Amino acid sequence: MPPLNSSQVPIIFAGVNGFLDKVPVNKVTEWEKDFISHVHSEHNDVLEEIRSKGVISKELEAKLRDICENHTKGFY
């Protein structure tokens, strides 16, 4: 299996940790596009850390949780 690119990691993180549970199924693709655009423009440091370290530290996990939570709240 090819390695994930750093943009895929926050999306998978959001799904695995329940942040998409309240997003209607027909809106998931829209949420994903909006989310990854947001992460690239506002949190590129997170993507760079994923690329450079290849692991999610406790600090990075906290950042990802905050980003996911705030984005999902603002999506509705």
Image (tube, rainbow, N blue to C red):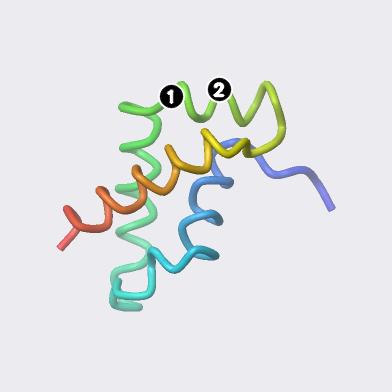
Residues at marks 2 and 1, CA–CA distance in whole angstroms: 6 Å
Determine the residue located farthest toward the front in the rendered image.
58
Q: Secondary structure at mark 1?
A: helix
The residue that label 2 is drawn on is 48
Residue 54 in percent (x, y) is at 71, 32
Q: Which residue lies most toward the bottom here?
A: 25
26 above or below 41? below
Mark 2 element type = helix
Q: Quadrant of residue 6?
A: top right
- Tag on residue 54? none
**Label 2 packing within 10 angstroms: few (<14), some (14-19), many (20+):** some
| Front residue of this view, candidates 47 and 30 | 47
Q: Is residue 69 above or below residue 64?
A: below
In which quadrant will I find the C terminus? bottom left
- Give amino acid for label 2: Glu
At a point 63% along the width and 39% down the height, the residue shown is 56
From the viewer's perspective, tell me whether residue 38 is left or right of residue 7: left
Identified at 44% across, 68% down, the residue is 18
Q: Position of residue 13 (x, y in %)?
A: 53, 54
- Up-down relation of residue 16 to residue 70 (above or below): below
Q: Is residue 74 left or right of residue 68?
A: left
Check if mark 2's residue and mark 1's residue have beta carbons within 8 Å: yes
Q: Amino acid at mark 1?
A: Asn
Identify the disc placed on residue 44.
1
Quadrant of the image occupied by residue 23: bottom left
At 57% from the left and 39% from the top, the residue drawn is 58
Residue at 42% across, 37% down? 63
